[in-house]
C-alpha cells in the first residue's frame, strides 16, 4: 500500500462545475500538505500549501486538511478548460536537517469540458 | 527566462548506453533535486544537493550518479541503461533545505526512453 493514495481519474466535469479532489495518507508524521498542478509534458507547479489541519483559500482554489482522518482535499470552483491537468498531492513531515523529501500521490487527471 | 532548465527534453537510447541529463537553475536557490516520475505518474525523489553537498540519496541503483559542479547546476549521469530506467526525470530546486513546505520549483522534465 502506498503512503499516499490518490484516485487516478480521469475526472471529467463541465465548465463552471466544482472540481473535488482528494488524497488519503497513512503516515501520521506528515505535517505539510501541498497540491501541485502538472500540465501535459510539463513539470509540476505548486498550487496550494497548507500546514497541519484546516482550510486555505486562494482565489478559486480551496485546500482542506483533516489530519484526524488523514485526508486532504482540493476544490476548484468555477472550473475552466485551462484547469485541465493532472493534480498531485504531496506531503512531508517535520523540519529536518536534510532537504525536502516530499511524498507524492499518483495524481488525478482532470478534464474540464467547454 | 526559464527558472529550472534541463536538457535534453527527449532522449531515446539503447540498453547498455551511458547518458547524462543536465540541469541549471537561475533562482539563486541553495538546494537542487532529481525526481523520477514513472508511467503511473508517481514522483519519487532520487537525490538532493544543498550547497553542492549530497543530503538525500534514496535507494537508487548506483548506476545513477548525480554531480553538482556548483550551486546552480545538478547533472544526472546514468550508466549501463536498462529498460526499466525509462521514465521522466525532473530536476527541481528550492530556496533552502529543510521542511516547512518549502516551495520546490520543477523543470519541464527529461523523457528518457531506453530501447
Image (spheres, rainbow, N blue to C red):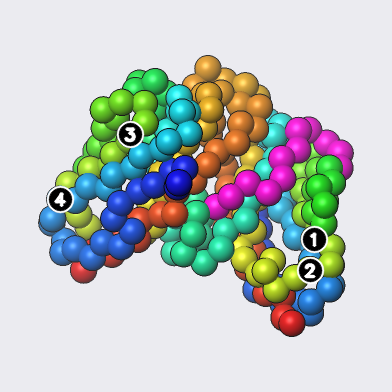
Asked whether the viewer can see residue B1, the reply is yes
Judge if badges 2 and 1 mark residues of a common chain. Answer: yes
Q: Quadrant of the C terminus of chain B?
A: bottom left
Q: Nearer the viewer, mark 1 or mark 3?
A: 3
Residue lying at 57% horizontally and 58% vertically, measured from the top left: A38
Q: Which chain's residue wears label 3?
A: B
Asked if residue A53 lies in the magenta stretch, the reply is: yes
Q: How far apart are marks 4 and 2 (CA)?
A: 45 Å
CB contact under 8 Å: marks 2 and 1:
yes
Judge if badges 4 and 2 mark residues of a common chain. Answer: no
Asked if residue A83 lies in the magenta stretch, the reply is: no
Give left or right: position of B28 versus B16: right
Residue that mark 1 sits on? A76
Q: How far apart are marks 1 and 3 (CA)?
A: 36 Å
Residue that mark 4 sits on? B18
Choose top left, top right, bottom left or bottom right for residue B88: bottom left
Residue range highlighted in magenta: A44-55
Q: Using the image, tell me which numbered label, if any, was put on residue B73.
A: 3
Q: Count neighbours of disc 1 (C-alpha within 10 A) and say few if under 14, some if 14 to 19, many if 20 or more.
A: some
Q: Which of marks 4 and 1 is in front?
A: 1
Q: Count neighbours of disc 3 (C-alpha within 10 A) and say few if under 14, some if 14 to 19, many if 20 or more.
A: many
Amino acid at each position: 500500500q502506498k503512503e499516499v493514495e490518490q484516485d487516478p481519474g480521469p475526472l471529467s466535469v463541465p465548465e463552471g462545475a466544482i472540481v473535488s479532489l482528494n488524497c488519503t495518507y497513512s503516515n501520521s508524521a506528515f505535517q505539510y500538505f501541498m497540491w501541485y498542478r502538472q500540465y501535459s509534458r510539463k513539470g509540476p507547479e505548486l498550487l496550494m500549501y497548507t500546514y497541519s489541519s484546516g482550510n486555505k483559500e486562494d482565489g478559486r482554489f480551496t485546500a482542506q486538511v483533516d489530519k484526524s482522518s488523514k485526508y486532504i482535499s482540493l476544490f476548484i470552483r468555477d472550473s475552466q478548460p485551462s484547469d485541465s491537468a493532472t493534480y498531485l498531492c504531496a506531503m512531508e513531515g517535520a523540519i529536518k536537517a536534510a532537504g525536502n523529501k516530499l511524498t507524492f500521490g499518483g495524481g488525478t487527471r482532470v478534464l474540464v469540458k467547454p | 527566462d526559464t527558472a529550472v532548465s534541463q536538457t535534453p527534453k527527449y532522449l531515446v537510447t539503447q540498453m547498455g548506453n551511458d547518458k547524462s541529463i543536465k540541469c541549471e537553475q537561475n533562482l539563486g536557490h541553495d538546494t537542487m533535486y532529481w525526481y523520477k516520475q514513472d508511467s503511473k505518474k508517481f514522483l519519487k525523489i532520487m537525490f538532493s544537493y544543498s550547497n553542492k553537498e549530497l543530503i538525500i540519496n534514496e535507494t537508487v541503483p548506483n548506476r545513477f550518479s548525480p554531480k553538482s559542479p556548483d550551486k546552480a547546476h545538478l547533472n544526472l549521469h546514468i550508466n549501463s541503461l536498462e529498460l526499466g530506467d525509462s521514465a521522466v526525470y525532473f530536476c527541481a530546486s528550492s530556496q533552502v533545505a529543510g521542511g516547512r513546505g518549502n516551495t520546490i520549483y520543477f523543470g519541464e522534465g527529461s523523457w528518457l526512453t531506453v530501447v
